[in-house]
Image (cartoon, helix red, strand yellow):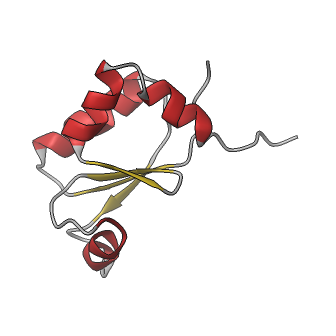
Amino acid sequence: MSVRNANVVVYSSPFCGYCAAAKRLLEDKGVAYEDIDVMFEAGKRAEMVARSGRHTVPQIFVGERHIGGFDDLNALDEVGELERVLADAQLPSNP
């Protein structure tokens, strides 16, 4: 199953081990994602908090669904649910 077109957003900051682990897990699955740096991109931390209700990074969204942090993403993967979540959020392919 190809999940390359899933609409995934990762709010992260540099030097964050959990952020790196989350992005590595997504990359290992072949998932493209938008990486939003909350440290250097003005207003992005406030946007993240407004969307997730959480102050820590990473905060991961698949489509409009808030997944949570790395532990939440990894837990979904371990029980085999991550592929389904990604497939549900898959964007239509360009004709």
Residue 21 as seen in the image, left or right of residue 32: left
Question: Dividing the image into 4 quarters, which one contains the C terminus?
Answer: top right
**Residue 14 visible, this angle:** yes
- The structure residue drawn at horizontal position 29% and vertical position 20%, both measured from the top left corner, is 78
- The structure residue drawn at horizontal position 61% and vertical position 23%, both measured from the top left corner, is 2
User: Hey, which residue is sitting farthest right in the picture?
Assistant: 95
Q: Position of residue 50 (x, y in %)?
A: 32, 76
Residue 57 against residue 30 in the figure, above or below? below
Residue 90 against residue 12 in the figure, above or below? above
The answer to which quarter of the image holds residue 94 is: top right
- The structure residue drawn at horizontal position 27% and vertical position 79%, both measured from the top left corner, is 46
Q: Position of residue 69 (x, y in %)?
A: 23, 47
Q: Position of residue 49 (x, y in %)?
A: 27, 72
Question: Dividing the image into 4 quarters, which one contains the N terminus?
Answer: top right
**Residue 4 visible, this angle:** no
Residue 17 as seen in the image, left or right of residue 36: left
